Amino acid sequence: MTFSLIARDDDGSFGAVIASSSPAVSARCLWLRDNVGAVATQNVTDPRLGQKGLDLLAEGSDAEAAAASLAGQANAAFRQVLIVGKEGRAAVHSGARSLGTVSSAVDGGVAAAGNLLANSHVPLAMVASFKFAKGCFEERLLIALRAGLNAGGEAGPIHSAGLAVVSGTGWRITDLRVDWNDKPVQELADILAVWLPQRDDYVTRALDPARSPGFGVAGDDRR
């Protein structure tokens, strides 16, 4: 019921993108931590595995070891987990009781995986598209999600999607969610097009408000 991709960018940022037939997928499934890594926990989702995976990375485990540890947790047969760490390696655990067509692909610091997929080629298409995509990190993540959808995506219709990035500021500089929509990937793309031109301004407002630009709304007379 879900397909996703997580990645470490060359500058040390971490990002993730996801789509599902279930509502509010991003809120439950995407977990990122500055200077540590990214985790996507899906299938019969246990959100607690996101924090556990990040804690394992923070304590010194690499992605493979963290994935192996999560594979030993209770009910791991129902879980699918993707992990990427700061060393730039990724890993995937897909439990034996994951639903439907299950597949994954890993290439360096990028991993994609899904369950109840239309076909087993979806994750590979996502990873390949991300690796060759141009643009900023968020744009490349979205390109990868579109590639997964174009490769078949989930076996049935999807209704929610999300995209998140951390880059060392202490919070998610991008955290966009479509919780229920007939075309969630297109809706996510539309939101991203609005967000990206303003993203860095919001970082400046947080870190150095004296230098921050105006909001361009009524009552804000800064120039």
Image: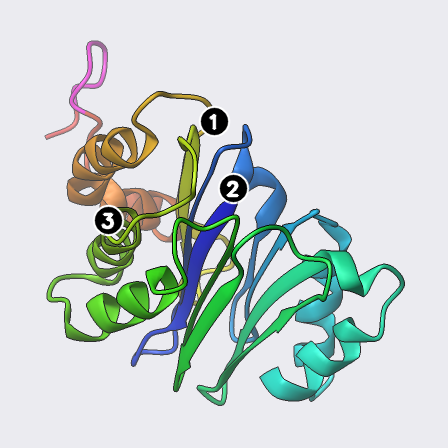
Q: State the SS at label 2.
A: helix
The CA distance from mark 2 to mark 1 is 8 Å
Instruction: Look at the numbered disc 3 and give the secondary structure of its residue.
Output: helix
Picture layout, residue 214 above or below residue 200: above
Circles 2 and 1 in contact, beta carbons < 8 Å? yes
Q: Earlier in the sequence, mark 2 or mark 1?
A: 2
Name the residue tied to disc 2: 26
Tell me the quadrant of the picture where the C terminus can be found: top left
Magenta stretch bounds: 216-221
Residue pictured at 16% horizontal, 37% vertical: 193
Taking depth in this image into account, of 69 and 203 the one nearest to the observer is 69
Q: Visible in this render: residue 62?
A: no
Indicate which label's residue lies in the foreground, 3 or 1. 3
Say which amino acid is labelled 2.
Ser
Question: Distance between the Cα atoms at labels 3 and 2?
Answer: 16 Å
> Where does residue 184 sit, x and y in percent of width and height?
34, 30
Residue 218, magenta (yes or no): yes
Question: Do the CB atoms of the residues marked 3 and 2 lie less than 8 Å apart?
Answer: no
Q: Which residue is mark 3?
A: 146
Task: Say which amino acid is labelled 1.
Answer: Asp
Residue 113 in sight in this render: yes
> According to the image, label 1 marks what residue?
179
Q: Mark 3 or mark 2, which has the lower sequence index?
A: 2
Up the image or down, 121 lies above or below 179; here it is: below
Q: Amino acid at mark 3?
A: Arg
The overriding secondary structure of the stretch rendered in magenta is: loop
